[in-house]
């Protein structure tokens, strides 16, 4: 597969019917997960709550594989505040932590107030006590925020449950006719919202820092690719570049002031960086080979990219100021779509071992050069890393259909996010949202 073909291959793979909300199928959890009980919360207000917050929190924590929520039917008591927790009840069923809470709304116009405490069963002490508030439409956000806080307290890693994901879905309308949708959803696949409908393919969604806007490639302009920026709050869209040939793979710089992209306006696919203030373009380490798939290093001073300048697709790093280029990958005959993991000084990439046909998501240490396969299917692509660096999402095939899958960076936890109706591709995990 050449890099040019790889750049547009996702468009050809989107070939199944109607958008539906993603669901979660956990396929592998961590060994010896922590047992945690999320007790039903007390509700003080009119009517019924629109969201089951303890159920959302339980699902969030179970999804990352490090926790095993206690089923309500196994709970010997249902306290709603720390003072009511009887520790022997929880020791008897093997719970290590207990979360209790209350939700109230003083009047129909008042905000919802959520108070919760977390108890350590073995130490018999309270380890957290917090209060959150929000509107009726923010109840699910409060649940994810609660999950983030518990996860960080108990693991030391910042939670990413309050983030969003982007993906592209394709609905087959008839012979040779498709409807493409750019979709935004919660990190668990809930609250899916279509941002763009098109009769032409949509590729390479990319988040700006802070999550307020995105960029992507759309073929809506007469079937030719163009790069668009899209403000999420207002819905305003702007076509950034639409040169003849390739306009692809937009990637925001860490400060949001620049946008890297692939253009073939000079006749050959090269990496360019656009200053978002002046709209000036600068070619980065141009070469007669094919360069594509830029992604930024955290300092904003260099880029990772894919190039076949060595004879096969491999990962390189280029310094913006000097244009100096360094090859980073040597194992395997195909390495592409790299993302840097600062916590591990490593890169996530699509990898193929020499002589094999399967494409996997892999991690390579930049200290040792060691490569480790993370995914288990055979046609894996478009990896996107959560902002806490703990999990990554990628596109793959399952039962002949395109789905999204997630694996932890250490390979211990896996789950799938199939859609009941659509073929989905091109996932992009948001940064932390401001």
Image (cartoon, rainbow, N blue to C red):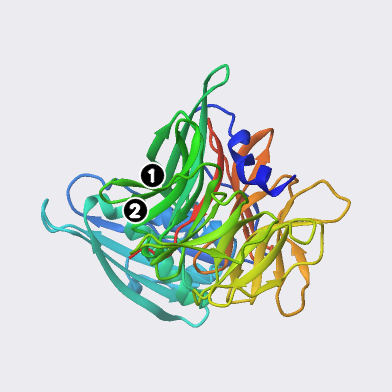
- Asked whether residue 86 appears in the rendered view, the answer is yes
Q: How busy is the neighbourhood of tag 1: few (under 14 within 10 Å), some, or many (20 plus)?
A: some
Compared with 400, 285 (above or below) is below
Q: Position of residue 374 (x, y in %)?
A: 71, 59
**Left or right: 323, with 105 as reference point:** right
Residue 276 percent across, percent down from the top left: 37, 62
Which one is earlier in the sequence, the residue at label 2 or at label 1?
A: 2
Q: Which structural element holds mark 1? A: loop
For the N terminus, the image quarter is: top right
Q: Which residue is mark 1?
A: 191
Residue drawn at the location 54% of the way across and 58% of the way down = 62
Give the foreground label among 2 and 1.
1
Circles 2, 1 touching at the beta carbon (< 8 Å): yes
| Badge 2: residue crowd in 10 Å (few <14, some 14–19, many ≥20) | many
- Residue furthest to the right in view is 355
Residue 217 against residue 327 in the figure, above or below? above
Which residue sits at x=28%, y=62%? Answer: 102
Q: CA distance from mark 2 to mark 1?
A: 9 Å
Residue 22 in sight in this render? no
Label annotation for residue 140: 2
Give the camera-side residue of 336 and 27: 336
- The residue positioned 61% from the left and 41% from the top of the image is 8
Percent position of residue 427, x then y: 53, 49
In the picture, the quarter occupied by the C terminus is: bottom left
Q: Compared with residue 247, is residue 70 higher up or lower down, i.e. above or below?
A: below
Residue 78: name its quadrant.
Answer: bottom left
């Amino acid at each position: 597969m050449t890099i040019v073909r790889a750049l547009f291959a996702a468009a050809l793979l989107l070939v199944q019917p109607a958008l539906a909300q993603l669901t979660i199928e956990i396929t592998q959890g961590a060994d010896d997960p922590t047992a945690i009980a999320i007790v039903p919360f007390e509700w003080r207000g009119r009517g019924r709550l629109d969201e089951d917050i303890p159920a959302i929190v339980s699902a969030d924590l179970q999804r990352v594989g490090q926790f095993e929520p206690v089923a309500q039917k196994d709970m010997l008591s249902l306290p709603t505040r720390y003072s009511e927790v009887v520790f022997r009840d929880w020791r008897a069923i093997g719970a290590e932590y207990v979360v209790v809470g209350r939700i109230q709304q003083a009047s129909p116009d008042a905000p919802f107030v959520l108070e919760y405490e977390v108890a350590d069963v073995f130490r018999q002490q309270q380890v957290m006590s917090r209060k959150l508030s929000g509107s009726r439409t923010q109840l699910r956000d409060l649940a994810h925020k609660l999950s983030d806080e518990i996860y960080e307290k108990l693991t030391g890693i910042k939670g990413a449950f309050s983030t969003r994901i982007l993906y592209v879905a394709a609905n087959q309308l008839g012979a040779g006719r498709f409807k493409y949708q750019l979709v935004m959803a919660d990190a668990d696949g809930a609250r899916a919202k279509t941002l763009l409908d098109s009769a032409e393919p949509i590729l390479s969604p990319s988040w700006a820092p802070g999550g307020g806007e995105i960029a992507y490639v759309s073929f809506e302009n007469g079937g030719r690719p163009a790069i668009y920026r899209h403000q999420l709050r207002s819905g305003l869209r702007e076509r950034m570049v639409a040169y003849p040939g390739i306009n692809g793979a937009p990637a925001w710089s860490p400060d949001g002031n620049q946008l890297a992209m692939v253009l073939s306006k000079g006749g050959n696919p090269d990496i360019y960086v656009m200053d978002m203030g002046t709209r000036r373009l600068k070619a980065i380490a141009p070469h007669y080979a094919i360069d594509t798939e830029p992604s930024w290093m955290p300092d904003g001073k260099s880029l990772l990219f894919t190039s076949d300048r060595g004879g096969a697709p491999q990962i390189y790093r280029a310094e913006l100021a000097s244009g100096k280029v360094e090859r980073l990958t040597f194992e395997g005959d195909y390495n592409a779509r790299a993302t840097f993991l600062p916590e591990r000084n490593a890169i996530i990439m699509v990898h193929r071992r020499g002589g094999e046909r399967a494409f996997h998501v892999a991690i390579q240490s930049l200290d040792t050069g060691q490569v480790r396969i993370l995914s288990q299917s055979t046609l894996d692509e478009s990896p996107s890393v959560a902002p806490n660096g703990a999990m990554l999402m990628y596109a793959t095939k399952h039962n002949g259909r395109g789905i999204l899958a997630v694996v932890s960076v250490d390979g211990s936890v896996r789950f799938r996010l199939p859609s009941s109706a659509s073929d989905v591709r091109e996932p992009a995990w948001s940064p932390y949202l401001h």
